[in-house]
Image (tube, rainbow, N blue to C red):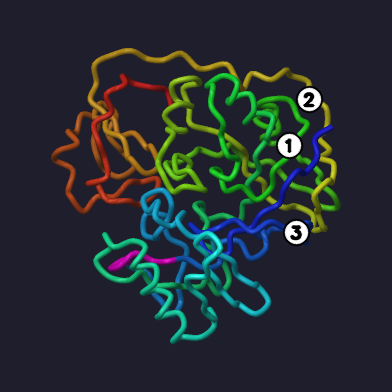
Amino acid sequence: MAAVSKLYRYPIKGLSAQPLSNVAIEAGRPFPFDRVFALARPGAPIDSDDPQWAKKGLFVMLMLDEGLAHVTTQVDVETLRFTAMQGNRQVATANLADEADRTELEKFFWQLLPTLAAPPALVRSRTGHFMDKPDNVISLINLTTLRSLEEQWGFDIDPLRFRANIYIDGAKPWEEFDWVGHEIKIGEAVFTVDRRNGRCGATNVNPTTGRRDLDIPGSLRAAFGHKNLGIYLIARESGRIAVGDDLYMPPLSQPSTAVRPPPLVNGARRSFICRGCYFIYEETKGLPQQSIRPGTPFAIIPASWRCPDCGTEKATFRPHVDGAVAT
């Protein structure tokens, strides 16, 4: 039987995971105190007084700013005391409720990320969050799936690359994809399994060294024709969950087909890939939902256009030379 192996929250988007032994889940709400703070990029259209959810490309994050991994951070959610460590040395401390402290902390992160044009702005969501998706989803990773990838690819993969809230062990590899559309129970809480989790370039960054030493989304695409790993849950019934709690899933009538890659489509068509989230723009398809007609060359799309998935600038895209892959 599958059971909870680890629980984590990430109080500041892009910064360190904080382990928990247990947590109270509230129906319809995100994981408690998860990504309630974020560092807005200089010039981003984020209202510091009343910041709202926005696409991740508008914030400082591991996907583009691997220098964040050079420090280990901690936030006391009761006192809002923040600390940053490099090895055994404390390099920053602040009260996140104090405006002067926040200003100094912004300068500290500018030192970590000197390519920014100005200090990032530390913002706090009043009622929501700054997770990658706008809805109140909770992320889950099946560690058995991860071990199967390690065996297939021949290298170790730190589970914290995926910045999930709930890590489970004991399920079959890829079994979690079959749960989509069904309910599961963990501890006292009940969840609907909403959808698969498409991975972005943040998973390429080693959370210990800060180096981009793997290509997780690209490897998934090459092996399976998609970049999905893990699932998103929506809390339906409130309750407390804890490390060691069993996960209950009603028996499914159909066997897993999650590991069967869809057929790859061969053909000469120009495509461009976002180096952040791995969204692919195909010229033959265009983006009709954005009034970009099929056949529109990438070169003539305005420079102000942003990735429809993560919001990063057009300049982050690169030619995608590995043929056309099913998404």
The span picked out in magenta is: 39-44
Residue type highlighted by circle 2: Leu
Q: Nearer the viewer, residue 263 or 102?
A: 102
Q: Residue at x 33, y 12 (%)?
A: 266
Residue type highlighted by circle 3: Ile
Tell me how far mark 2 sits from mark 3, CA to CA.
Answer: 26 Å
- The mark nearer the N terminus, 1 or 3, is 3
On the image, the x and y values in percent for residue 207 come to: 51, 48
- 117 left or right of 7 in image: left
Residue ID for mark 3: 25
Q: Residue at x 36, y 69 (%)?
A: 120
Residue type highlighted by circle 1: His
Q: Secondary structure at mark 2?
A: loop
- The mark nearer the N terminus, 1 or 2, is 1
Q: Secondary structure at mark 1?
A: loop
- Assess disc 1: are there few (<14), some (14-19) or many (≥20) residues with their C-alpha within 10 Å of its C-alpha: few
The quarter of the picture where the C terminus appears is top left
Tell me how far mark 1 sits from mark 2, CA to CA.
Answer: 9 Å
Q: Nearer the viewer, residue 288 or 157?
A: 157
Is 269 rendered above or below residue 127? Answer: above
Closer to the observer: label 1 or label 3? Answer: 3
Q: Are marks 1 and 2 in contact (CB under 8 Å)?
A: yes
Q: Nearer the viewer, residue 296 or 25?
A: 25
- Assess disc 2: are there few (<14), some (14-19) or many (≥20) residues with their C-alpha within 10 Å of its C-alpha: few
Residue ID for mark 2: 252
Q: Are marks 1 and 3 in contact (CB under 8 Å)?
A: no
Residue ID for mark 1: 182
Is residue 149 highlighted in magenta?
no
